[in-house]
Image (tube, rainbow, N blue to C red):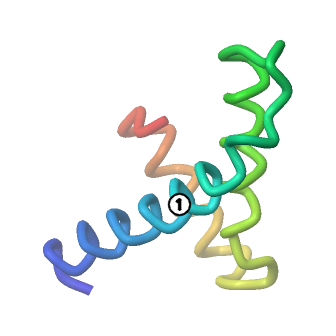
Amino acid sequence: MNKREKKRFVRMLIQNIESSILHRADEWPPEWDGIELRWLLRDHFGKCVMVGTGNRRRKMAYNNEVLVKNLV
C-alpha cells in the first residue's frame, strides 16, 4: 500500500465510523458530554479492528514503532 492509498484507507475508515456514530445521535442521552462521547468513539473504533489479523511478530513491531515514534 503506498502513501496515497494509506491516507485514502484511513479517510474512508474514519468517514464510515463517523457516519455510523452520527446516524444514531438522536438516541444519545442528553446528559452525555465529552467523556461519554469519547467512550462511544473508542467503542466504535475498537469494533473496526479485526481480531486475529496479523501475527505476534507483526504486532510487536507495530507496538515498537508506535512507542519509538510517539504515534499515539
Taking the spot 67% from the left edge, 69% from the top edge, the residue there is 48
Asked whether 35 or 19 is in front, the reply is: 19
Q: Quadrant of residue 7?
A: bottom left
Asked whether 52 or 45 is in front, the reply is: 45
Does residue 72 appear to the left or right of 9 in the view shown?
right
- Please rate how many residues cluster around mark 1, counting C-alpha atoms within 10 Å: few if below 14, some from 14 to 19, many from 20: few
Q: Quadrant of residue 56?
A: bottom right
What residue would you read off at disc 1?
Answer: 19
- Residue 20: x and y in percent read 62, 62
Taking the spot 16% from the left edge, 72% from the top edge, the residue there is 3
- Residue 41: x and y in percent read 66, 42
Q: In the figure, 34 relative to 42: above or below?
A: above
Q: Under tag 1, what secondary structure?
A: helix
Taking the spot 59% from the left edge, 74% from the top edge, the residue there is 58
Amino acid tagged 1 = Ser
What count of labels does the image hold? 1
